[in-house]
Amino acid sequence: MAQKRTSIPRPPRTKAVRETPGTPSHEGSRHIALLAAAAGLDKKATAVEIIDVMGKVDYADFLVLMTGASDRNVAAIAQEVDAALSKQGYRSISIEGLPAAHWVLIDFVDVVVHVFQRDVRSLYDLDGLWMDAQRVPVPEPDGEDESSETR
């Protein structure tokens, strides 16, 4: 039941939209990243991180990284993130990596969500690549006292 999507061109970006953190566009992107993280946590994603890459790359404001326990779990997490954000009015423009589900990328234009299996996440080490970038605190899921998995 893999859903195949075709990529559509991204809208042009302007400096006025991406000037500084705290602009309405940046706060909207942050909101989308937090929604994505919450949806992933609802499907038992672990090691969820939101990385603020605004001004460091031109393709996104935030990267959301999360880990699934298996290919089925990664696929379920990715599908839940896409469905939950779609219900909120945020449609992805591309989903890559299904049905293999070792690493699924969901592109919401200013927010890019990466859902990995643990060994693939370690191999590509996006966490380490963006070591110096600011992290956005991810709220703990309701009713749980456990902290996220550590790398």
Image (spheres, grey):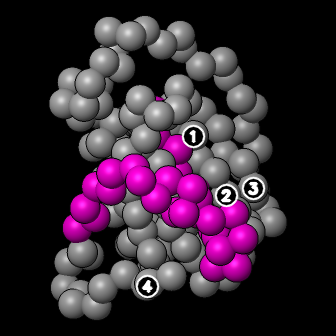
- Left or right: residue 99 versus residue 40 is right
CA gap between label 3 and label 1 equals: 12 Å
> Which mark is on residue 107?
1
Could you tell me residue 135's position as x and y percent?
Answer: 33, 56
Could you tell me residue 145's position as x and y percent?
Answer: 21, 90
Question: Per the image, is 132 magenta?
Answer: yes
Q: Amino acid at mark 2?
A: Val
Mark 1 and mark 4 in contact? Answer it, CB < 8 Å: no
Magenta-colored span: 110-139
- Label 3 CA crowd tier, 10 Å (few <14, some 14–19, many 20+): some
Q: Amino acid at mark 3?
A: Gly
- Left or right: residue 58 versus residue 141 is right
- Label 4 CA crowd tier, 10 Å (few <14, some 14–19, many 20+): few
> Which mark is on residue 95?
none
Q: Earlier in the sequence, mark 4 or mark 2?
A: 2
> Which mark is on residue 97?
3
Question: 109 and 8: which one is in front?
Answer: 109
CA gap between label 4 and label 3 equals: 23 Å
Q: The N terminus appears in which quarter of the rendering?
A: bottom right
Mark 2 and mark 3 in contact? Answer it, CB < 8 Å: yes
Confirm whether residue 149 shows in the render: yes
Residue topped by disc 4: 149
Residue topped by disc 2: 104
Could you tell me residue 31's position as x and y percent?
Answer: 27, 43
Tell me which corner region of the image, top left, top right, bottom left or bottom right, holds residue 47: bottom left
